[in-house]
Amino acid sequence: MKNEVLQAIADRRSIRAYTEEALTEEEIRTLMDVAMQSPSARNAQPWHFTFVTDQALIESVNAASAKAMGRDSVNIFYGAPLVVFISAEAEPFFPKLDCGIAVENLALAAHAMGLGSVILGLPKAGFDGPDGAALKKAMEFPDGYDFMIAISIGHPAAGKDAHPMLEGRISRIG
Ligand SMILES: Cc1cc2nc3c(=O)[nH]c(=O)nc-3n(C[C@H](O)[C@H](O)[C@H](O)COP(=O)(O)O)c2cc1C
């Protein structure tokens, strides 16, 4: 069998449908540890992780995002029982990259735990829109922090094929 980490990287998919089963507190605690174990430039740990299982709060971001996108309705969290919102300050060093690494840590850990996940950029519309300030407060983003990325996590109710890999994206020199 392939090394477990390599297998998880190979098998992870964006999962966009979940069962109604909630995550256990132990699972959530494990994911919190995973988030905080992520590497960051100069070890700045520039992030704030907001773990949300409150469906009304998740729906308020969904509704604000729909409004900001000029749509009647959207379903950007796919009914996930847990959404992690990652916020950070814009500077210094590499906060966006750090948050990207942290969200992939969460995606791989979720997969390794038998859960499904999808990384989400779309909630940015809601946080940048007219309801953004209220949402940041409700999400307990620290002062000056902005939405960077989110991830929906739950028990998978659908599978997905691996994404097709684009040609010509790798050079091997020497
Ligand atoms: C930064 C980032 C933002 C993304 N935002 C969304 C999103 O808002 N909604 C969504 O359904 N998928 C989103 N995705 C998932 C991608 O569509 C997905 O990773 C890609 O199609 C490859 O599929 P795979 O993850 O199954 O390999 C995002 C992925 C990344 C890395």
Image: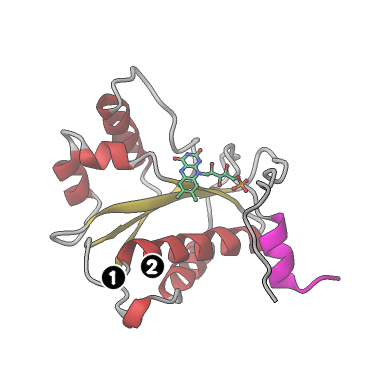
Mark 1 residue CB less than 8 A from any atom of ligand 1: no
| First to last magenta residue range | 1-11
Assess whether residue 69 is covered by the magenta stretch: no
In the picture shown, does residue 125 fall above or below 89?
above
- Residue 74 % position (x, y): 40, 26
Marks 1 and 2 in Cβ contact (< 8 Å): yes
The answer to whether 121 appears left or right of 147 in the picture is right
- Nearer to us in this view, 94 or 79: 94
**Most frequent secondary structure within the magenta stretch:** helix
Q: Seen from this angle, which residue lies furthest right?
A: 1
Which residue carries the number 1 mark? 46
Q: In the image, which disc is placed on residue 7?
A: none
Quadrant, the N terminus: bottom right
Estimate how packed mark 1 is, as few (under 14), some (14 to 19) or many (20 or more) residues with alpha carbons within 10 Å.
many
Which residue carries the number 2 mark? 98
- Nearer to us in this view, 127 or 164: 164
| Amino acid type shown at disc 2 | Asp
Q: Seen from this angle, which residue lies furthest top?
A: 72
